Image (spheres, coloured by chain):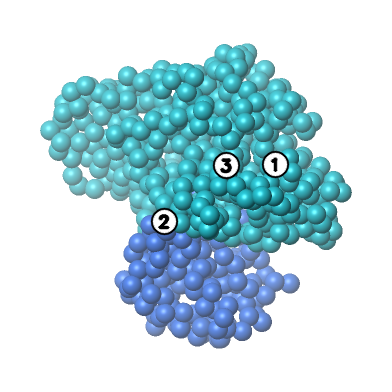
Chain colours: A blue, B cyan
Amino acid sequence: MPKPVLLFGYGNLSRGDDALGPLLLEYVESHCSLDMIEILSDFQLQIEHALDLENRRLVLFVDASVACIDAFDFTELEPARDKSYTTHAMSPAAVLDVYQSIQKQTPPPSFLLSIKAEKFELGDGLSANTETNLAKACAFAERLLSNPDLDFWLKQTEQA
Amino acid sequence: MYEHLETAENQGNLKRVAVDPVSRVEGHGKVTLLLDADNKVQQARLHIVEFRGFERFIQGRPYWELPVLVQRLCGICPVSHHLVAGKAIDQLVGVDPENLPVTADKLRRLVHFGQVMQSHALHFFHLSSPDLLFGFESDISKRSVVAVLAEYPDIGLQGVKLRKYGQEVIRMVCGKRIHGTGAIAGGMNKSLSKAERDYLLEDIDQMIEWSAGSVALIKKVHCSNLPYYDEFATIRTNYMGLTKPDGALELYHGGLRAKNANGETIMDHIDYCKYNDYIHEEVRSWTYMKFPYLLSLGQEQGWYRVGPLARVNNCDYIDTPLAEAARIEFKAHSGEAMVHSTLAFHWARLIEVLHCAESIKQLLHDPDIMGQDLVAQGEKRYEGIGVIEAPRGTLFHHYQVDENDIVTKANLIVSTTSNNMAMNESVRQVAAEYLSGRELTEPLLNNLEVAIRAYDPCLSCATHAVGKMPLQLELVDAEGKLIDKLVKHSDGQIEREDA
């Protein structure tokens, strides 16, 4: 059986702030107990990642986002038939929708931790502001993952 | 051909239409059309705006980092960059392809078949099947893989699972789906265990069956409207790629072969380490992307296509039975020595998926695949060149290192660059044949995207930030005034903004 909590960070370590998702995973690997948590990473989300959601109790996606207003944003996800299907990279909501289509059941409770990002040039490191955003998001993720409880996570969406 | 539409005269009197970026392809591309007062296309160009910095990214690094590092060039085909870097640094440690341990060679081939299979499956089932199954001008809400899953659930699910299987091949051989360290200088760093071999064997017959089904599907789709499929975005070109010494289809290692539009051989069995003697790249002022061409034919006549269509056209046969039968049917349908239909890229792509599935099964049953002799050694050299057939076509990596093993010079020719001229030609063909004089609508402009998408271009690599993929369509009059604007947001919503 897979571990009950899936932490899925995505992005490219060599493209500036796009590294935020994978870097948060590195923090979790070295600071959190992984007894209940499986960590997966990829450059981008794709259709087959729907199969990684099977038999999970909670799913947390982590991504860089230029749309964030604060350092990070934490939201509950619903399956959505958005047009991220039309690119090589899908949104997490679209992955949930693929899960629903192929499994014929509601996907596990899933959340998105978006970390504010600015620059994505090949070969660049994190920008200065983004370092701070990452530190705040890591502390938040640590608190979430040490309380892998749906009600607790839902409360955090109201406070984030 | 449509070269006359590359640069228009009297550009100041023309309206400008921009589709930016092209969706369903990687990175940022932009199509610009200049129209005259009668909405006739006077100029059409595909701009690729982010294709730079690869060489700078590699220079200054120790060579042994490269197989892992270059995976980050592309989130779509990282394994292709990984393997071609492995081939190039083999030479830096004095190991030529024929001296690579048999097991290492077969493990690299295995992971490459997995990579090509999953990449092609993604392209067909996810990116192209909505257009092909529902029609190029169908409602945009239908042009998605979820619509395919809803109306063709078996086909949609097979696409997801074929993709997943290819990823599992990569994971078993390299240890991870991404950032794996399978290929190292002179060989591989991990053998395949019996448990891993048996795990992959469990589903391979199903994968072959589904792959064969996908070939039958694309043949049916293509032949159900043959005149249209054979004409849409079609251009008569040269073709280039690797083949085995006996002329068979080859994806991992072989000699360079090029044929012209009539199927006549331009060059054959060329050692790719001498690619500079045969291929040059031209720079044009309006795009960052170069235009490669065969030196013997010159800039005007020497451009060529690479990728599945080129490979299936160029080879004499395919050495797996089901794919070979499919190739024979494919070649026969056109009645010509070469199949020139741009939409036939899809058909050729699925023949390759079938070939990959059959080849994976053969390799998994080969006792060498679980061997333990993984690394060869030789004497240091200062230059290494690797070439591979990536999913989208021939991929070149060329490195020079100094006495401290630091890369001092790198040159990459990626597949999409080789198809640059061809994609521009297909855009011009579609623009000239399908858009001129007509009202510009989203479904109509999707025809342009369909033409580009057939090549499965990877316009940039691996960045995907939320909110960064809008699609804009602007109409500007002869005075440069914006008179209409459609915006397709990253969530797929389309709105007309006030001009």
Say whether mark 2 and mark 1 are on the same chain: no
Instruction: Residue at 59% x, 54% y: name it.
Output: B67
Task: Give how far across and how far down residue B91 sits, in percent.
Answer: 63, 46
In the rendered image of this protein, does residue A160 appear above or below residue A116? below
In the rendered image of this protein, does residue B18 appear above or below residue A9? above
Instruction: Residue at 68% x, 42% y: name it.
Output: B96
Residue pointed to by mark 2: A122
Q: Kindly identify which numbered label has been placed on residue B97.
A: 1
- The three-letter code of the residue at mark 1 reads Pro
Left or right position of A61 against A134: right
Query: Where is the N terminus of chain A found, in terms of image quarters?
Result: bottom right
As measured in the structure, the alpha-carbon distance from the residue carrying label 3 to the one carrying label 2 is 23 Å
Is disc 2 placed on a helix, strand or loop? loop
The picture quadrant where one finds residue B385 is top right
Is disc 3 placed on a helix, strand or loop? strand
Task: Give how far across and how far down residue B460 sits, in percent.
Answer: 44, 47
Residue pointed to by mark 3: B385
Mark 3 chain: B
Mark toward the viewer: 1 or 2 = 1
As measured in the structure, the alpha-carbon distance from the residue carrying label 3 to the one carrying label 1 is 11 Å
Is disc 1 placed on a helix, strand or loop? helix
Work out whether residue B163 or residue B149 is closer to the camera in this orientation and state it: B163
- The three-letter code of the residue at mark 3 reads Ile
As measured in the structure, the alpha-carbon distance from the residue carrying label 1 to the one carrying label 2 is 31 Å
Say whether disc 3 or disc 1 marks the residue closer to the N-terminus. 1
Query: Where is the C terminus of chain A found, in terms of image quarters?
Result: bottom left
Say whether mark 2 and mark 3 are on the same chain: no
Give the residue at the far left of this rendering: B479
**Callout 3 touching callout 1 (CB < 8 Å):** no
